[in-house]
Image (tube, coloured by chain):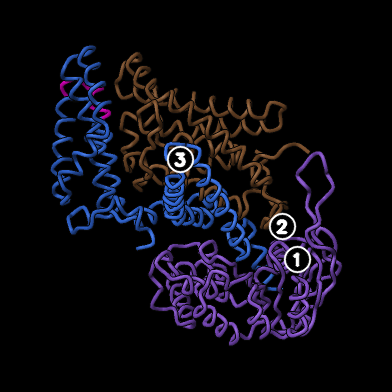
Amino acid sequence: MNEPHPGSSSRPPAAAAPARRRRGWNAMDLSLIAVFAALMAASVAIPGINVGALGVPITLQTMVVSLCGLVLGFSRGTAAVSLYVLLGLIGLPIFSGFRAGPAVLASPSAGYIIGFIFGAAVVGALATLAVRSRWRVVGLFGAALAGGVVIHAFGIAGFMLRGMGLQTAVVTDLAYIPGDIIKNVIAVAIALSLHRAFPDLLVRRRK
Amino acid sequence: MRGHAFVVAGYIPGNSVFHRMRLGLKAAGLFLVAVMCLASPFVSVAVGFWTTTAALAAVVGAHFAAGLPWGRLWRAVRLMLVFLVLIAAYQWWQHGPAVAWQVIAAIIATVLASNILTATTPVDELLDGLASIVRPLERIGADPERFSLTVALMLRSIPFVIGAFADVRDAARARGLERNLMARSLPVVIATVAYARSTGEALAARGLGEPAIKTVERAYKD
Amino acid sequence: MNQAVSPSIVLSGAGVSIESGDPRSPAPKRILSPLSLTLAERRIAVIGANGSGKSTLLRLLNGLVLPTSGTVHVHGRNTRDEGTAVRSMVGFVFTDPLSQLVMPTPLEDVELSLRRMKLGKARRREAAMAVLAGYGLEHLAASSIYELSGGERQLTALATVLAVEPSVLVLDEPSTLLDLRNTKLLMERLAALPQQVIMSTHDLTLAATFERVLVVDDGHIAFDGAPGDAISHYRKLVG
């Protein structure tokens, strides 16, 4: 995957321009991957935000998954979410409810956690295409939605693997859909703002 | 290490058998529990039922042998309770009570077993364990040093991000925007990205995290 | 210093401009006009308003920013072709030490700096302790960097940079986040260093103690000379 690297920019000028020509990630990429993985982990520790009508506290996890893809693109976004999942699986209490360890894979909601990785990958790949297209905003939102579909598909598959019936699994999953759509709208809005604040950060427009 | 204070939450200090056991052994034990619970039903329903029940009993025993509190056990179950009930109902309806119990007990046993592992192993040991898994991958082109650096960066950034969330929540509250998801998250993400960029720049300035470490050695020699 | 080649830093027609990012006006934006300078004095201060181009000038010196025109050489090495070598000769201290300190504790951070020296784990730890002790920070070795005061953090950042013994030290407004006492402490440490020190600052009293002062204004060097004249020039500039 040919990721845009942070190159020359406005104030303060971005670092590590010399590494741009080398293969692989430079220091800036590693830093972004690590910090977005931290954002994933921190979003778990933040108490849910009560959003008016829904009455259900919204957690920011799926929003951050979308953001990883929208902001970092395919390879760095996938890496950030994978790093988060990996560290959760080896035992850091950074999954929702402060759960941790390999047995999260045995729990009924394991599908969502694995789905995060593939969701971020799909969002990242589509977002890279979307920012280059004429329909940037719609494209980014479509990318985020597609990622959401992937995450929910994994979630439902996870429920079923643990012995839940298809109908029950789908109905259980549906409870999360409205919140996730709101979060995707916000993720796209944030991504667009970030694009203005840091023009060289996001998947770059074709010159 | 106190620097990881936030993420140490999972670890409960103690001096039990499990606290002293090597991480590899604990991981092997966890693997064994998982295999027993997941594979035994394939032999027969009865074997699955009894093996899983025994495994669950053993794991609960181990939980208390490790000196872990009741609350910890209950919390692990409570977080999955809704799903467990749904699964049990469906399995009972489809296959009867024995299978329902086996499926539920298998999930609880593996989750508790992994809970014991994480509660009795300090974060640093877990990270060392991770590093030792990654090290052999060096031969196929992975870079364990840069991987460890990225992990360290992530751990060190968590308190920063949590702090940013707290600051932004206070600011949003002061302006009466407490329920505005955008006002609560955009400033956090902006601050986080700015922080990531200054950290990336500082890494580059110190010559860290860049792929071409061999160039440095050459530069020193000539 | 082992690299006793003089003069240490030479900029020849080095300028920086960036793409505007705005498709409607694609003309590149000039951050720093091409300038030619030889920086050989042991203590050089850079003063100027926010956004004047100070930070970009400093980042040119260790290759964090590459000139879009002209060249920058450090001890005869081009920052463009030998960036890694240049960065090992030029240490850089940032305004905010929290973005500079990567590891959770000072000890681990210094160890990270020493990674390039390919010591064993135990020897590296020993060497890192020695570095911290050298700057009077050994009692903080195992503290979380979040528990350190601003001054302690900046001194730790300085120690991690100096651990690899650069021959030039560049500091970008290192005292901006420090109180008066910590600024004084930092400056005492800097004064005692054998290295060449190039520092930007808003603190004119500090700048007055340097051998040579550059005044940067709107991407140009507006004045270059003795501190007294430079500071009065800067005051006039600000009006």
List x then y, in percent, for residue B30: 27, 42
Residue C230 visible within the image: yes
Q: Tell which subunit mark 2 falls on.
A: A
Near mark 3 (Cα within 10 A), the count class, few <14, some 14-19 or many ≥20, is: some
- The N terminus of chain B sits in image quarter: bottom left
User: Which residue is the extreme one toward the front?
Assistant: C239
**Image check: B12 left or right of B145?**
left
- Separation of marks 3 and 1 at Cα, in angstroms: 48 Å
* Chain letter of the residue carrying label 3: B
Q: Residues within 10 Å of mark 2 (few under 14, many from 20)?
A: many
Which residue position holds label 2? A18
In the visual, does A122 lie left or right of A54?
right
Q: Do the residues labelled 1 and 2 touch (CB within 8 Å)?
A: yes
Tell me, for residue C79, which label it has, or none. Answer: 1
Q: In this image, C51 relative to C140: left or right?
A: right
Distance Cα–Cα, label 2 vs label 3? 43 Å
- Colour applied to chain C: purple
Residue at left offset 73%, top offset 53%: A8
Residue C1 x/y as whole percent: 66, 84
Q: In which quarter of the image is the C terminus of chain B?
A: bottom right
Residue B96 drawn above or below residue C228: above
Q: Nearer the viewer, residue C125 or B217?
A: C125
Kind of residue indicated by mark 2: Pro
Which hue belongs to chain A? brown
Q: Which of marks 3 and 1 is in front?
A: 3
Q: Which amino acid does label 1 sit on?
A: Thr
Residue C17 quadrant: bottom right
Name which residue lies at 24% across and 12% down. B94
Q: Do the residues labelled 3 and 1 touch (CB within 8 Å)?
A: no
Q: Do the residues labelled 2 and 3 touch (CB within 8 Å)?
A: no
On whether residue C67 falls in the magenta region, the answer is no
